[in-house]
Image (spheres, rainbow, N blue to C red):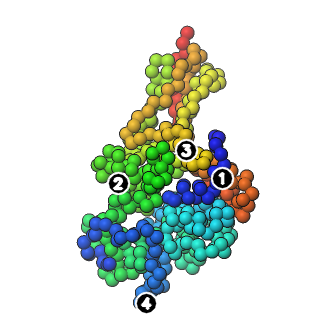
């Protein structure tokens, strides 16, 4: 994989990372004004005096004391690990202001922002010993890390001004009497795709070749999924599970694609159809999908090989540029044809490889070679190792071919 230039880390951070009460009341339709503009769980006020220390604690471990199933699903998600080593490894050279710009999506609450570089240095030291930004067992005695380390935590979506918000109760469920933290306000918008847009739909001002760097909500709106109101949550939070599975999860990706092999004349064909993905596959500029085919003879020797790539390839050179866009749109089917097959071909092997962090792999390599990132070098190396571990084989198959005389 080649990269056109060394992308300044500050520009990466700005462009790629920028990214009531009781349950008995009738659900409101929309979120309170400004819900995602500089969100704050406390809004600068102390928690109500009569609240317990548990009710006034914004850490996910505190939420887990009553909402354990949600915590257990969340703790393995990308949201829980959005405060990542590859991001904070760049903070010493970015400075506080640009670091906080990254946290707009990776740790969204005002309470998670840095006040000074001492906080950045503290994060660098803490992460080397605590790659999880929370206690995975929800042990309150061990909930000692700064809230920012928990990434997109419970409070980031559900708490504003100490008030709890969430989707309406499911049909047949009953609100608890005397609920903790004065219950919650039910809002239908929690089940709308637009709820995710603050971080998963970049503005038109960040467009390359007419398309924002992340354009997921618009892709969904223009798809049959949007027209049928099949929301983000129905795929990424089925049954309201807080798993947020995506491109890093092989099972999730397999469920969204049909892949089949067939022979047609003197060719082998792999067909891939996006059957249950409500946006481009992949939707962001960081993943890449590679399809490889090999024609082999009776001895198993490779006679010829082919390779295709599915991704949106971008580079920065005095501004962002789109070099290519070969992604599958919702409902699209594409054929990857190995042709012509030589006379000695007895089989054609296909493999589909998913590289979820392809862009970041190149970025981390560049950052590791830059002296500007010495203070975060251990974190950059850790991020590169994690990115390598995220690759997986989505599909492998073989077509038998009768050799021609």
Residue 323 horizontal/vertical position (percent): 55, 40
Mark 2 → mark 1, Cα distance in angstroms: 34 Å
- Residue positioned most to the top: 405
Q: Which residue is mark 3?
A: 321
Q: Secondary structure at mark 1?
A: helix
Mark 3 → mark 4, Cα distance in angstroms: 54 Å
Q: Earlier in the sequence, mark 2 or mark 4?
A: 4
Up the image or down, 304 lies above or below 124; here it is: above
Mark 1 → mark 4, Cα distance in angstroms: 47 Å
Characterize the local packing of mark 4: few (<14), some (14-19) or many (20 or more) Cα atoms within 10 angstroms: few
The residue at the point 44 percent across, 55 percent down is 203
- Nearest-to-viewer mark from 3 and 4: 3
User: Looking at the image, which is closer to me, 137 or 148?
Assistant: 148
Characterize the local packing of mark 3: few (<14), some (14-19) or many (20 or more) Cα atoms within 10 angstroms: some
- Residue positioned most to the bottom: 49
349 to the left or right of 28: right
- Nearest-to-viewer mark from 3 and 1: 3
198 to the left or right of 171: right
Mark 3 → mark 2, Cα distance in angstroms: 30 Å
Residue 301 horizontal/vertical position (percent): 65, 24
Q: Earlier in the sequence, mark 3 or mark 2?
A: 2
User: Looking at the image, which is closer to me, 115 or 281?
Assistant: 115
Mark 2 → mark 4, Cα distance in angstroms: 39 Å
Q: Which residue is mark 4?
A: 49
Residue 17 horizontal/vertical position (percent): 54, 58
- Nearest-to-viewer mark from 3 and 2: 3
Q: Which residue is mark 2?
A: 231
Up the image or down, 195 lies above or below 220; here it is: below
The residue at the point 29 percent across, 48 percent down is 227
The residue at the point 63 percent across, 25 percent down is 302
């Amino acid at each position: 994989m080649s990269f056109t230039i060394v992308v300044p880390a500050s520009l990466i951070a700005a462009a790629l990372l920028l990214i009531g009460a009781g349950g008995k009341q009738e659900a409101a339709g929309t979120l309170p004004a400004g819900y995602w503009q500089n969100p704050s769980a406390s809004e600068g006020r102390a928690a109500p005096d009569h609240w317990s220390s548990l009710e006034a604690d914004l850490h996910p471990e505190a939420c887990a004391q009553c909402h354990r199933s949600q915590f257990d699903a969340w703790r393995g998600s990308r949201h829980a690990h959005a405060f990542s080593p590859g991001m904070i490894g760049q903070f010493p050279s970015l400075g506080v202001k640009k670091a906080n710009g990254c946290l707009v999506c990776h740790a969204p609450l005002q309470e998670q922002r840095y006040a000074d570089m001492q906080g950045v240095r503290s994060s660098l030291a803490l992460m080397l010993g605590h790659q999880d930004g929370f206690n995975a067992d929800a042990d309150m005695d061990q909930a000692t890390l700064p809230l920012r380390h928990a990434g997109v935590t419970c409070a980031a979506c559900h708490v504003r001004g100490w008030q709890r918000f969430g989707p309406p109760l499911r049909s047949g469920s009953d609100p608890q009497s005397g609920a903790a933290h004065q219950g919650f306000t039910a809002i239908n918008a929690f089940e709308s795709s637009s709820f995710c847009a603050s971080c998963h739909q970049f503005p038109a001002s960040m467009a390359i070749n007419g398309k924002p760097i992340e354009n997921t909500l618009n892709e969904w709106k223009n798809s049959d999924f949007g027209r049928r109101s099949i929301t983000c949550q129905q795929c990424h939070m089925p049954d309201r599970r807080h798993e947020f599975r995506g491109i890093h999860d092989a099972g999730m990706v397999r469920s969204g694609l049909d892949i089949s092999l067939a022979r047609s004349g003197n060719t082998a064909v792999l067909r891939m159809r996006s059957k249950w993905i409500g946006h481009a596959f992949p939707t962001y500029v960081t993943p890449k999908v590679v399809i490889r085919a090999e024609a082999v003879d009776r001895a198993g020797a490779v006679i010829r090989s082919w390779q295709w790539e599915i991704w949106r390839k971008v580079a920065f050179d005095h501004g962002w540029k789109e070099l290519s866009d070969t992604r599958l749109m919702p409902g699209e089917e594409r054929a990857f044809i190995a042709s012509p097959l030589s006379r000695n071909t007895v089989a054609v092997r296909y493999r589909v490889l998913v590289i979820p962090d392809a862009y970041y792999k190149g970025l981390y390599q560049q950052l590791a070679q830059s002296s500007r990132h010495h203070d975060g070098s251990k974190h950059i190396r850790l991020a590169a190792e994690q990115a390598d571990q995220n690759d997986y084989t989505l599909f492998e198959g073989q077509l038998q071919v009768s050799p021609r005389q």
